[in-house]
Image (tube, helix red, strand yellow):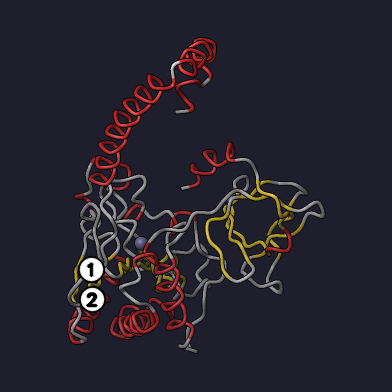
Amino acid sequence: MLSLFGEHARRRGLIALIALVAIPGLAAAIVTGLDSARFAAAQREAAAIAAAQPAIVPLEGPIVVAVQPGHWKIDELPAEHARRNRGIGAVYAGVRELDINLAVVDALVPMIRARGWTALVVPATVPPGLRADAFISVHADWGADINRNGWKLAPPWRPSPAASDLAASLRAAFASRSELREDVGGITVGMRGYFGFASHRYTNASSPYTPAALVELGFVTNTTERARMVSNPEYYAEIIMDGLERHFFSWSRSDAASLVPRVFETMRISEEGGAAFLTPDAGSRVVRRLEPGEPVRPVDATDGWYEVRFRDPSQIAWIPSSALAQDRVAAATEADGQGNL
Ligand SMILES: [Zn+2]
C-alpha cells in the first residue's frame, strides 16, 4: 500500500488519507479491494516468471556427459557466432587441433558408455540450453614459443559449485600424471568466457545449470606434446575419464542448489592496498599491485581467495581476502561488472 501514497501522489494521497481516516469503514473496503486486485496482478506476474524460468530439476536416469571436440563443424555455427565460423583451431606441422580433439572424444565416448553413463557428442553449435551432468569441451593449444607446454582447464566465469568441482576434479586428474605439467597462468579470458557455455550471451550455449569446463590438453606447437596427443589420444581420454569419476564421486546430483552459478558482490581493496597473484597461493607470482579502495568484482572464489578479472591490462588474478575491505561497494557499480562476461 505504500506506493499508493508514494512519491508521485504524495499530496493527493495525504488528502485521501485524511478522508479515509474520517470514514474508517470505507477505508477498509477500498484497501481490501486494492489489495486483492494487486495480488492478482502479482500472481500473474509470478506465474509468468516461473514459466519463463523453470525450476532447476536435477537430471534423472544415467549420468549424462556431453563432450565436444573443439571446433568440430565450426563452419555450421549460426549467425550469433558468425565471427567465429572460421575458427578451425590450432594447426602446426601438418597437425590439426581438430583431429586431436576428435580422436580424444572418439576414445572417451566408449569409456563413458562402459561406465553406464550416457555420452552426448556436441558440435561447435551447442544445442540451446543443453542440460548434462557435465559438459567438457576438448581442445589443444597453440603457442608462439615452441617450448611452451602444459595442460590447463577452466570452468565458466562465476561457476556453480558443481562446475567448480568438475574443474577441480579434472585438474586433480591431470595433476596426478607426473609426466605432464600445468600451463600455470595460461588460462585466458576466451577460455573462461567460451561461447559454448556463455548462456547469458548466446542461444547456442549450454544451460547455466550444466557444469562445464574447457580443457586444453597441451600444445600442438610443442614437439613432445604434439607427438603424445597424435599417437595416444586414449591417454588423454583416460585422464578426462579419471576427472569425471572423481567429480561424480564427490558431487551429489540431487543437490540442485549446487547447479546455480555463483553471484559475487563488488568489493573494495583495503586502505593498505595489496597484491594480486597468479594463483590462489601467496607464494605464486605477483601479477598486479592493487590500489587502496580499488573496486573489484570477483569471478570465482576458493578458500580465502577471490579470483578477479582485470581490464587494462586484461588479466585474471587472485586476491587474498585479507586484501579486501570489509564494506561492500554500492549496488550501482554491479551493473557495470556484468559486462565482464
Ligand atoms: Zn581450440
Does label 2 point to a residue whose CB lies under 8 Å from ligand 1? no
Q: Secondary structure at mark 1?
A: loop
> Can residue 138 be seen?
yes
Residue for point 38% across, 19% down: 26
Q: Is residue 223 above or below residue 18?
A: below
Which residue is found at the position 34% from the left and 80% from the top? 248
The residue type indicated by label 2 comes to Ile
**Contact, CB < 8 Å: mark 2 with mark 1?**
yes
| Inter-mark Cα distance, 2 to 1 | 8 Å
Task: Judge left or right: residue 112 versus residue 254.
Answer: left
- The residue tagged 1 is 59
Residue toward you, 229 or 40: 40
- Density class for disc 2 (Cα within 10 Å; few <14, some 14-19, many ≥20) is some
Q: Report the amino acid beneath label 1.
A: Leu
Above or below: residue 291 compared with residue 214: above
Query: Which residue does the image show at 73% across and 54% down from the upper left?
Result: 325
Q: Residues within 10 Å of mark 1 (few under 14, many from 20)?
A: some
Q: Residue furthest right?
A: 272
Taking 202 as reference, is 276 left or right? right
